[in-house]
Amino acid sequence: MSAVPLTAEQNRETAAVAEVIAAGRAAALRHWVPATSGNFSVRINADRVAITRSGVDKGALTSADILIQPLDAPLLPRSSAEAPLHLALYRRDPSIGAIFHVHAPGSTVLSRVAGPGGLRLTGWELQKALPGITSHEQAIEVPVFANDQDTDRLAGLVEARLAAPTADGALLAPGYLLAGHGLYAWGTSPKEAARHLEALETLFEFELSYRRFTP
Ligand SMILES: CSCCC(=O)C(=O)COP(=O)(O)O
Ligand SMILES: [Zn+2]
């Protein structure tokens, strides 16, 4: 009996699930997703994403832990508690290919030091790992939102903030912080989202150390 070949769409779905599993494992190796925290998603096409289920160990994901969520349908049972934050970003920006959320130490601590509002980054060469940044002299704005257990309401605030202009023409980071909670970062592909996540978390660690030495 010959196997039925997979369609291009099925191949895309399988690849997206594998990317979600790999992103969770990479984050866990860096201790960025302690105690089942974090959530990860990868776009399959214009209408659907692969996203982690709620409450599972993101460092030991299997394909059974990944849901295929249509963007314009109610949340599937056992979906991530933070799925509305992922879906809102995919809906507003078709170029987003992956979204990763971690509870990494630099992000989580700095989000409380900065408080709700915005965080400015400038002076760091590593900023150039972010899109549109060509100099350490440019300013990057990272929105910081008060944490909220109502993630639909939070998604509405994020959408409004990302649509608003920044002060002084600063570039918006491909990510934001939830105060006392963690970091969301995205990119056009899983690889780019991972690079943005790593750059932002490292910049936040730099910033925390720097602030200890400066008034
Ligand atoms: C144990 S961390 C609390 C929930 C959270 O912030 C998180 O990132 C994980 O939520 P999920 O529903 O996606 O597992
Ligand atoms: Zn979280």
Image (cartoon, rainbow, N blue to C red):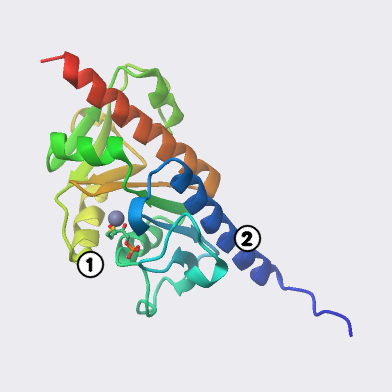
Disc 1 versus disc 2: distance between alpha carbons?
28 Å
- Give the residue number, with chain letter if any, for mark 1: 152
Check the image and report above or below for 154 versus 66. above
Query: Is 118 left or right of 102, judged from the image as shown?
Result: left
Q: Furthest-front residue in view?
A: 35
Under circle 1, the secondary element is helix
Residue 75: % across, % down: 36, 76
Q: Name the residue type under label 2.
A: Ala
Residue 201: x and y, percent?
Answer: 35, 35
Task: Relative to 53, say whether 188 is above or below.
Answer: above
* Nearer to us in this view, 27 or 86: 27
| Circle 1/circle 2 CB separation < 8 Å | no
At label 1, the amino acid type is Asp
Q: Where's residue 189, x and y in %?
A: 53, 48
Drawn side of residue 116 relative to residue 10, left or right? left
Please report the residue visible at 12 percent of the width from the left and 43 percent of the height from the top. 116
201 on left or right of 143: right
Mark identifier at residue 20: none
- Residue at the spot 51% in from the left edge and 42% down from the top edge: 192
Which one is earlier in the sequence, the residue at label 1 or at label 2? 2
Q: Is residue 13 visible?
A: yes
Q: Quadrant of the C terminus?
A: top left
Label ID, residue 15? 2
Give neighbour class at mark 1: few <14, some 14-19, many 20+ (Cα, 10 Å).
some
Say whether residue 47 is visible.
no
Q: Secondary structure at mark 2?
A: helix
Q: Quadrant of the N terminus?
A: bottom right
**Residue beneath the point at 19% across and 56% down:** 157
- Crowding around mark 2 (Cα neighbors within 10 Å: few <14, some 14 to 19, many 20+) is some
Quarter of image, res 122: top left
Question: In the image, ligand 2 is in what quadrant?
Answer: bottom left
- 98 up-or-down from 165: above or below: below
